[in-house]
Amino acid sequence: MELTHDDVLTILDLLDHSNVEYLELEVDGTRIVADRSGTAVPPAESAVLAPQPVAVPAVRAPEPNDPDLVTVPAPVVGVFYRAPEPGAPPFVQVGDAVADDTTVGLVEVMKMFNGVTAGVSGRVAEILVENDAFVEFGQPLLTIRPEPE
């Protein structure tokens, strides 16, 4: 049995409405760790579902056509939002200038929103994930072409 997007959302909803402090679940090679205290230290290959923001620095992703692009990864497993609320304009569009601390999106986990920052100054080169899409930990969300500040 493989976990689907709906399965993960159901699990997160059940946890949100319970007094469970810690849950570790592995299904068919997919491992989820949810820890309300934020003290669990999972193995590096695990996805962590934590109710507090998680800082994930932008990483260089070697692209065959453009090695200078920097990829901004998802900080946690959850649902990616390009705008702060429904109907609002997106945080960024392709071509927009960003600073390293510019919010470029949100990832929702257990009704907690984790801000995703650019991590580098430059211009948004490509947005890789649609609004309201389920994302995995570390999944590339967008790319930025670095520019000197």
Image (tube, rainbow, N blue to C red):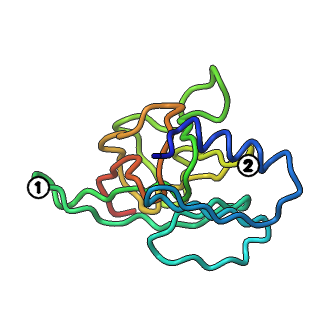
Vertical relation: 40 (above or below) 137: below
Residue drawn at point x = 67 percent, y = 30 percent? 85
At mark 2, the secondary structure is strand
Q: Amino acid at mark 1?
A: Pro
- Of residues 146 and 64, which is closer to you in this image? 64
Residue drawn at point x = 34 percent, y = 63 percent? 148
Read off the residue under disc 2.
Answer: 112
Residue furthest out toward the right: 19
Q: Is residue 60 left or right of residue 79?
A: left
Vertical relation: 7 (above or below) 109: above
Q: Is residue 121 left or right of residue 37?
A: left
The circle on residue 64 is 1
Q: Is residue 67 left or right of residue 1?
A: left
At mark 1, the secondary structure is loop
Q: Earlier in the sequence, mark 2 or mark 1?
A: 1
Coordinates of residue 107 in the picture (x, y in percent): 59, 47
Which mark lies nearer to you, 2 or 1?
Answer: 2
Residue drawn at point x = 74 percent, y = 42 percent? 13
Q: Quadrant of residue 61?
A: bottom left
Residue furthest out toward the top: 87
- Of residues 77 and 99, which is closer to you in this image? 77
Q: Amino acid at mark 2?
A: Met
Residues packed near mark 1 inside 10 Å, few (<14), some (14 to 19) or many (20 plus):
few
Residue furthest out toward the left: 65
Coordinates of residue 105 in the picture (x, y in percent): 55, 44
Q: Could you give the CA–CA distance between mark 2 and mark 1, rounded to whole angstroms?
A: 36 Å
- Of residues 36 and 71, which is closer to you in this image? 36
Q: Quadrant of the C terminus?
A: bottom left
Coordinates of residue 23 in the picture (x, y in percent): 71, 63
Confirm or deny contact between disc 2 and disc 1 (CB under 8 A). Answer: no
Q: Quadrant of residue 21?
A: bottom right
The circle on residue 103 is none
